[in-house]
Amino acid sequence: MTMFSRDSIVTCGFCLAIGGVILQQCHGFPETSGQGFGSGPAFYPEVLAWLLMGLGLLSLRAKPGQADDCAPAQKKPARPRYGLVALILGLSVAYIFIQDLLGFFPAAAILVLAMAWAVTPPKSPARILAYLVYTAGLLLVVYLVFELFVGIQLPCSSVWA
């Protein structure tokens, strides 16, 4: 008999519950042809819900202490970075309001750059260039997936539209 850790059971249960709620909510979405590979606006949330539930089930495979076995022992535990968590939460909330004003692309670029800068402040121009390339690549992938493949229009600016 396989024993599961309490952490993996809680993680799996949480992922299955949230995924199930998302799937249930998707049934109330309107049926629209042409979006989401012909599945309507519920397509993307359904894909994410199934992925979340699959990852939750995969969490049951982890054995207690398995991830830490290969890690070198730390002399002193790292201090929690509550300020960074608060900053990222604040940036995410600000993004919601900025997106309505500027549109998706400028707002998302500001958000991604600000978060990258906050997590690892750049110490060289090469790092800044890497952040810019990463941001441009991420926005390109989002554009390709949503606008071209799924057919969902990204939010436009209320100022310039």
Image (cartoon, grey):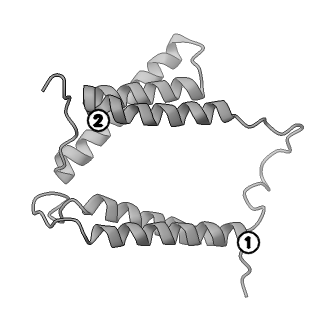
Amino acid under disc 1: Ser
In this view, 81 is above or below 32? above
Q: Find residue 49 and report its horizontal and vertical position in percent.
A: 40, 65
Give the residue at x 65% y 73%: 9
| Secondary structure state at the residue bearing disc 1 | loop
Amino acid under disc 2: Leu
In this view, 8 is above or below 2? above
| Secondary structure state at the residue bearing disc 2 | helix
Rate crowding at label 1 as few (under 14), some (14 to 19) or many (20 or more) other CA atoms within 10 Å. Answer: some
Q: Which label number is shown at residue 136?
A: none
Q: Nearer the viewer, residue 6 or 1?
A: 6
Q: Find residue 126 and report its horizontal and vertical position in percent.
A: 51, 15
Rate crowding at label 2 as few (under 14), some (14 to 19) or many (20 or more) other CA atoms within 10 Å. Answer: few
Q: Which label number is shown at residue 140?
A: 2
Q: Which label number is shown at residue 5?
A: 1
Residue at mark 1 to residue at mark 2: CA–CA distance: 40 Å
Q: Quadrant of the N terminus?
A: bottom right
**Pointers 1 and 2 in contact (CB under 8 A)?**
no
Residue lying furthest right: 75
Give the residue at x 30% y 41%: 142
Task: Tell me which corner region of the image, top left, top right, bottom left or bottom right, holds residue 161.
Answer: top left
Q: Find residue 73 and report its horizontal and vertical position in percent.
A: 86, 45
